[in-house]
Image: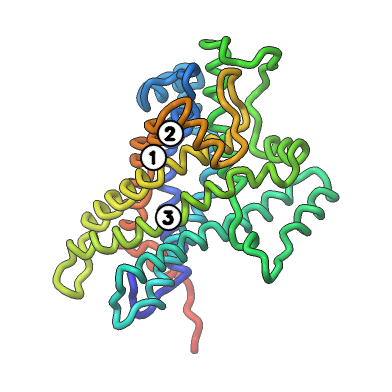
Amino acid sequence: MADKQISLPAKLINGGIAGLIGVTCVFPIDLAKTRLQNQQNGSRLYTSMSDCLIKTIRSEGYFGMYRGAAVNLTLVTPEKAIKLAANDFFRHHLSKDGKLTLLKEMLAGCGAGTCQVIHRQVDLRDQIRGCESERVRGKYLLSMRPKASSPRNVIVTTPMEMLKIQLQDAGRIAAQRKLMPETVAAGTVETKSPTAMQLTRDLLKEKGIAGLYKGLGATLLRDVPFSIIYFPLFANLNNLGKRGIDGPAPFYVSFISGCLAGSTAAVAVNPVDVIKTRLQSLNRGSTEDAYSGVTDCISKIMRNEGPSAFLKGAYCRALVIAPLFGIAQVVYFLGVGEFILSFLPKKDN
């Protein structure tokens, strides 16, 4: 992980391929996680992950399990690439003679998590190009102009993840209308499932820029600690399976280490993920609580649902993250990015 020479283009390709393969495989579980986390007392439609997936297939068909997948693939592929490449970059520059202390491993993970969040600012810029109004677009981009003393330019949330949650949760709301009509607010009109672009336009029109930034604090509290836990844990687990002092670990050791580290980090930050999901969900039943912020969300969940609610969807999240990062480490081990780049003509020095 801290090689003397690193190829950032190859690392970016490896991370992108890993994200694409991993998300395609585990997205239905991620959808189940979102729907389970959004359930509140009095409006429980699903009893477990398997129950959620079975009911989703029955009511929405097979492809209903992939609601919001396009948005998620757009988000995760470059995000995973940047996150994994950034960790290698920081480990490379923090190491001395190829060795890292635990503190420096955690700092490298923190840097990778921060780069992941920075990347989302670029996502936000790209997404706004499709907005209907030049006036809104101009005002929006002006608000994102860099300011030397403002930390808000470094720490931003991802509207694309917020859109993914709305698309994933739309099926739960539709199912509640049919099976649990008492949980739907009176006078609510049933509408067709919106697209990501329609959601973006509606958010900008009704809530302004702040609507796209909902859940900012919770997103930060989830992503950075996740990286601080995951990367050092993976590195140390992977080192246990190395062949000799300097030899690489077998690919299956890298896969298992990625799965174990990913699932551990995922469960550790799951309470914050529940808070983030609740804050970013816009459509609610008549019996479900609304939240004004992180502290309000924590207090209402504790009062109305108890501490166990913060572990909702934890096993789903572990099942999503474990193969995602296990696959990522195998792609790194196989050197897919390096293999692809080997076909490109080399520049003469």
Please tell me whether residue 192 is drawn above or below residue 142 in the rendered image.
above
Q: Determine if residue 164 is in view.
A: yes
Q: Secondary structure at mark 2?
A: helix
As drawn, the residue found furthest toward the right would be: 135
From the viewer's perspective, is the residue at label 3 or at label 2 nearer? 3
Q: Determine if residue 65 is in view.
A: no
Q: Amino acid at mark 3?
A: Pro
Q: Secondary structure at mark 3?
A: helix
Please tell me whether residue 283 is drawn above or below residue 204 in the rendered image.
above
CA gap between label 2 and label 1 equals: 6 Å
Circle nearer the N terminus (3, 2): 2
Which residue is labeled 1 in the image?
317
Identify the colour scheme used. rainbow
Where's residue 173, x and y in %?
56, 22
Where's residue 62, x and y in %?
46, 25
Give residue 27's quadrant in the image: top left
As drawn, the residue found furthest toward the left would be: 244
Where's residue 137, x and y in %?
79, 51
The residue depicted at 70 percent of the width and 35 percent of the height is: 198
Report the side of 279 relative to 266 (left or right): right
Which residue is labeled 2 in the image?
33
Where's residue 120, x and y in %?
58, 55
Q: Amino acid at mark 2?
A: Lys
From the viewer's perspective, is the residue at label 1 or at label 3 nearer? 3
Which residue is labeled 3 in the image?
225
The residue depicted at 51 percent of the width and 58 percent of the height is: 116
On the rendered image, what quadrant is the N terminus found in? bottom left
Q: Are marks 3 and 2 in contact (CB under 8 Å)?
A: no
